[in-house]
Amino acid sequence: MLQQLAEASRKDAGNQRFEVQQQASRPNHFTVVEAWADQKAYEGHVLAAHTRQFRDKLGPMSGALYDERLFKPVD
């Protein structure tokens, strides 16, 4: 699922980076690092079918809320 999400997301308009880091000893522990050209590109990704599909499948498997945090560069 992570590989499919990454491949589809990298094709989204405005994507600058989409990287998945998965813990070697626990594959269910992962971090996704994304960079988008602007807020509109990010929102388009959030609403994309492949993103919604990923979250719909992940929810029942994880048993926890999807922890999403937005960061911005410090200049």
Image: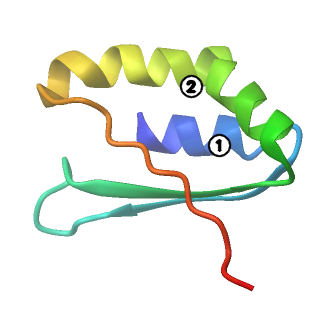
30 horizontally vs 37: left or right:
left
At 77% from the left and 27% from the top, the residue drawn is: 44
* One can see residue 38 in this view: yes
What residue is disc 2 on? 51
Residue 73, percent from left and from top:
68, 75
* Element on which disc 2 rests: helix
Which amino acid lies under the numbered mark 1 shown in the image of this protein? Glu
Disc with the residue nearer the chain's start (1 vs 2) = 1
Foreground label between 1 and 2 = 2
Residue 70, percent from left and from top:
54, 52
What residue is disc 1 on? 7
Which amino acid lies under the numbered mark 2 shown in the image of this protein? Thr
Quarter of the image containing the C terminus?
A: bottom right
Does residue 16 lie above or below 66 as drawn?
below
Q: Which residue lies furthest to the front in this view?
A: 75
Quarter of the image where one finds residue 46: top right
Does residue 21 lie above or below 70 as drawn?
below
